[in-house]
Amino acid sequence: MVDDAGTESLRASAMTDTASRKDFYSRIGARNLKPLWEVLRGQLTAEPKPPEAAVLWRYEEVRPFLLEAARLISVEEADRRVLVLENPALPGKTRATQSLYAGLQIVMPGEIAPCHRHTPTALRLMVEGEGAFTAVDGERTSMQPGDLVITRSWSWHDHGNGGNGPVVWLDGLDVPLVGFLNATFFQDYEETAHPLVRPDGDSQARYGTGILPIDYQAAPASTPLLNYPYRITREALNALEQAGDLDPCHGVKSRYINPVTGDYAMPTMGAFVQLLRRGFRGARYRSTDSTIYQVIEGSGRTILQGQTLDWHAHDVFVVPSWEWHQHQTDTESVLFSFSDRPVQQKLGLWREQRDCN
Ligand code: GTQ
């Protein structure tokens, strides 16, 4: 329908415009050129628009699948027997968030996940079982539930289980980030296990007690400590809680550090742990680092925009970048979490906002 002559001519010129623009785009496209004005606002968004979704994996549901996987495939064949926690909004991308990977790894009694190394950094948060160990560059560390174990970039590592039942831990790796930077290298070791060249507990004694060997000079990008035992972390959280060091959004929250430099334990992934007392009702908070949480102890919920994630011990969940959220607990709870915060902070990008002071 034509209302009047003016409108008709406007429409005609808009149509010609569209046609001639399309023609223009296709001619420049052939020369690998694109018009920025068609995409500018989609890329320079007013605020972060993360592609990942908030999501929760119930450990109770995943555990039987891990045991089934252990019957289905040997560790020799699988190399790493892991169920990847893939964000449903990033199908086929094998990642929990845009920048980080998470998975649950199961090792059965007597098995050894063979030795290899890669430029992506890995963290393990022990979930269940007794007798697990990781060896990093020839130093073994035994893993108890709640321990954080670090595998720095390009270090040889194999995992084993010297106990009588299955062991499961959460793997967190910066594979997507390192892949984005095209800096991925991977190498298998010629043997299943690296020879042990240092005694168990060596890195703890050297770097993890508040004293350093007198001539130690290195300022390594990743912590030289292999293991952050939960026994020690939990005691510290308790003491801080007793001291009344409570944040309205985070309860008692600390970050894992490289004891030599005071920086984050890993250059690409920030790891955090927080204690939320029973009946905690957190104030709303958001930050630009999409975060993967693992519930070490307790139960509660995280309320996001438009949905609530109910969590119990060992569940894993994702809070996307810049999404308002608040934590609440039913019982006293400890949450482990990790994100790409160190990278954002080094680049001057990280932001946070809170509904409290
Ligand atoms: O244990 O080295 O979940 O290389 C993914 C890749 C674990 C590991 C993963 C790996 C590992």
Image: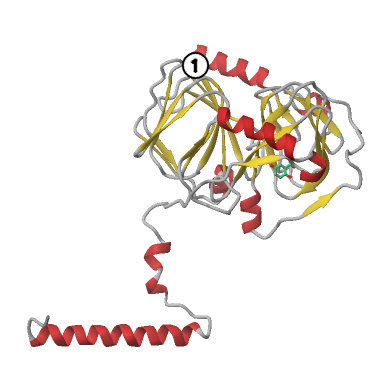
| Quadrant for the N terminus in the image | bottom left
Asked whether the viewer can see residue 256, the reply is: no
Label 1 near ligand 1 (CB < 8 Å): no
Tell me the crowding category of disc 1: few under 14, some 14 to 19, or many 20 or more residues within 10 angstroms, Cα based.
some
Quadrant position of residue 157: top right
Of the residues shown, which amino acid type is indicated by label 1?
Glu
Task: Judge by depth and name the residue closer to the eye, 251 or 168.
Answer: 168
Q: Residue at x 53, y 81 (%)?
A: 32
Measured as percent of width and height from the top left, residue 286 is found at: 41, 39
User: Looking at the picture, does residue 65 appear above or below residue 18?
Assistant: above
| Quadrant for the C terminus in the image | top left
Asked whether the viewer can see residue 80, the reply is: yes
Measured as percent of width and height from the top left, residue 190 is found at: 91, 47
User: Looking at the picture, does residue 192 appear above or below residue 329?
Assistant: below
Tell me the quadrant of ligand 1: top right
User: Looking at the picture, does residue 2 appear above or below residue 311?
Assistant: below
Q: Is residue 305 left or right of residue 338?
A: left
Q: Secondary structure at mark 1?
A: loop
Task: Judge by depth and name the residue closer to the eye, 30 or 205.
Answer: 30
Q: Residue at x 44, y 24 (%)?
A: 247
Q: Residue at x 71, y 33 (%)?
A: 106
Measured as percent of width and height from the top left, residue 137 is found at: 84, 39
Quadrant position of residue 130: top right
Pointer 1 residue = 332
**How many numbered marks does the figure carry?**
1
